Image: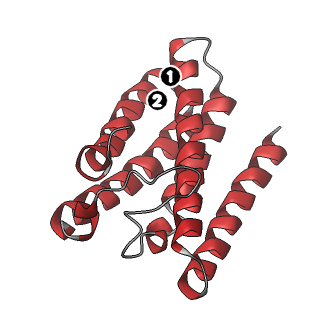
Amino acid sequence: MHIAIKSLVAGITLSAMAGVTFAQTVGKLEDQIRWRQSAYHTMAWSMARIKANIDGTYNKEQVAEAANVIQAIANSKMGALYQPGSDKGKGWKETRLKPEFFTDKETLGKVGPAFGAAANEMAKVAAGGDAAAVKAQFGKLGEACKGCHDKFRKEE
């Protein structure tokens, strides 16, 4: 199981890195939006896996796997997929990115690194296996996500 998850994380990371290179040279805005949406859906699934373990029967391996996926995406340099104009258009669905993303650099400069730090800490805490510590860090990770969502994501 660990090998399969490590392979998944490596694949996502390599795909993200390849996507960044492609986005910088050829990628259409619609592709960039679709890649972003895919990464966020993968992180949402991983957050749901952690929450299910916190609320139910705790499985250290499942939590660590999910936390590692979130960490990999958080550190994948996805910022390259936020090209000017990508606040309009459609990937898998209409983008929910607000135009303020491109103008409020002060907030962006705070929420981006805060999310990365929270994701890194989540992976570290999850590896330790302490369910109470995971629950506490999961709350902090959720708040880091919310910091960006509140300012830069339109509601559906």
- Up the image or down, 142 lies above or below 69; here it is above
Callout 1 crowding tier (Cα within 10 Å): few <14, some 14–19, many ≥20 = some
Q: Quadrant of the C terminus?
A: top left
User: Viewer-proximal residue, 57 or 125?
Assistant: 57
Determine which residue is flagged by label 2.
Answer: 134
Q: Quadrant of the N terminus?
A: top right
**Is disc 1 placed on a helix, strand or loop?**
helix
For this view, does 100 lie left or right of residue 25? left
What residue is drawn where x is 57% and y is 11%?
Answer: 56
User: Viewer-proximal residue, 139 or 95?
Assistant: 95
Which residue type carries mark 1?
A: Ala
Which residue type carries mark 2?
A: Val
Q: How far across and how far down the image is residue 147, in percent?
A: 26, 46
What residue is drawn where x is 61% and y is 85%?
Answer: 26
Q: How far across and how far down the image is residue 71, in percent?
A: 53, 52
For this view, does 71 lie left or right of residue 22? left
User: Viewer-proximal residue, 13 or 79?
Assistant: 79
Label drawn at residue 131: 1
**Is disc 2 placed on a helix, strand or loop?**
helix
User: Viewer-proximal residue, 78 or 155?
Assistant: 155
Residue furthest top in the image: 56
What residue is drawn where x is 18% and y is 66%?
Answer: 104
Q: State the colouring used for the structure image.
A: secondary structure
The reply to whether dot 1 and dot 2 touch (C-beta < 8 Å) is: yes
What residue is drawn where x is 40% and y is 56%?
Answer: 116
Label drawn at residue 118: none
